[in-house]
Each structure stands twice: as structure tokens, then as C-alpha cells.
């Protein structure tokens, strides 16, 4: 699965994307974030405040409790603001 990171999430982790093999026990975006947070201290810091995270599964915005199913791509990013 391809994981994409944007804005300060990308800056804290130090990369814009990574390809990972997600364990079968990880079935939701929230569980994916928990699992990713264990990859490094940088991941843990980026994901420390879940209220500041948003996600998209295969380019569709979803809540963090959404299932990931057979997703090919999950994006994790801060809330989008515009002007």
C-alpha cells in the first residue's frame, strides 16, 4: 500500500510517501495510523495528535474510523484550509 503524507505531516516524518505491507489485523485508517506511529520516533511525533489529522483512501476523503479494505493508497494530512 502506498502511504502519502502532506504538509507538516510530511515534514515531521521526513518523506512524502512510503510503500508498506500493512498487517491483515490493520483494518481502519485509525489502526493504520497507530501501526505507522510505531515505525519511528518521527512517525510517532507526526501522529501524536489524531484530532489534527485527516485522511483519504484511494483519493476519497474518509473519517479515521473508515475501513481501508483493499486500498491501494492512503493519504494522511492536516485539515485543509483555504482562502
Image: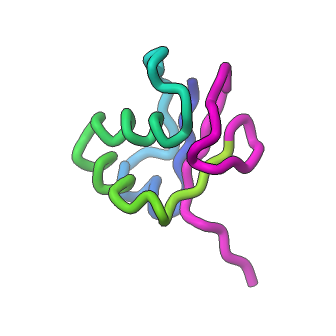
Quadrant into which the C terminus falls:
bottom right
Q: Is residue 78 magenta?
A: yes
> Residue 57 lies in what quarter of the image?
top right
Residue found farthest to the front: 65
Name the colour scheme. rainbow
In magenta, the rendered stretch is: 57-83
- Relative to 22, does residue 73 appear above or below in the rendering? below
> Does residue 46 appear to the left or right of 7 in the view shown?
left
Q: List x then y, in percent, for residue 4.
A: 56, 42
> Does residue 32 appear to the left or right of 49 in the view shown?
right
Residue found farthest to the left: 41
- Relative to 65, does residue 12 appear above or below in the rendering? below
Residue at x 67% of width, y 75% of height: 81
Q: List x then y, in percent, for residue 46.
A: 37, 55
- Relative to 30, does residue 50 appear above or below in the rendering? below
Main SS, magenta region, reads loop
Quadrant into which the N terminus falls:
top right
Q: List x then y, in percent, for residue 14.
A: 37, 49
Q: List x then y, in percent, for residue 37.
A: 33, 42
> Residue 71 lies in what quarter of the image?
top right
Residue in the foreground of this view, choosing between 31 and 36: 31
Residue at x 43% of width, y 45% of height: 15
Residue at x 57% of width, y 48% of height: 64
Residue at x 25% of width, y 40% of height: 40
Residue in the foreground of this view, choosing between 81 and 68: 68
Residue found farthest to the bottom: 83
- Relative to 77, does residue 34 appear above or below in the rendering? above
Amino acid at each position: 500500500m502506498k502511504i502519502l503524507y502532506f504538509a507538516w505531516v510530511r515534514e515531521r516524518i521526513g518523506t512524502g510517501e512510503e510503500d508498506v505491507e500493512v498487517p491483515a489485523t490493520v483494518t481502519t485508517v485509525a489502526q493504520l495510523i497507530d501501526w505507522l506511529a510505531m515505525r519511528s520516533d518521527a512517525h510517532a511525533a507526526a501522529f501524536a495528535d489524531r484530532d489534527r489529522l485527516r485522511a483519504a483512501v484511494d483519493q476519497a476523503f474518509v473519517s479515521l474510523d473508515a475501513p481501508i479494505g483493499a486500498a491501494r493508497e492512503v493519504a494522511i494530512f492536516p485539515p485543509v484550509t483555504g482562502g
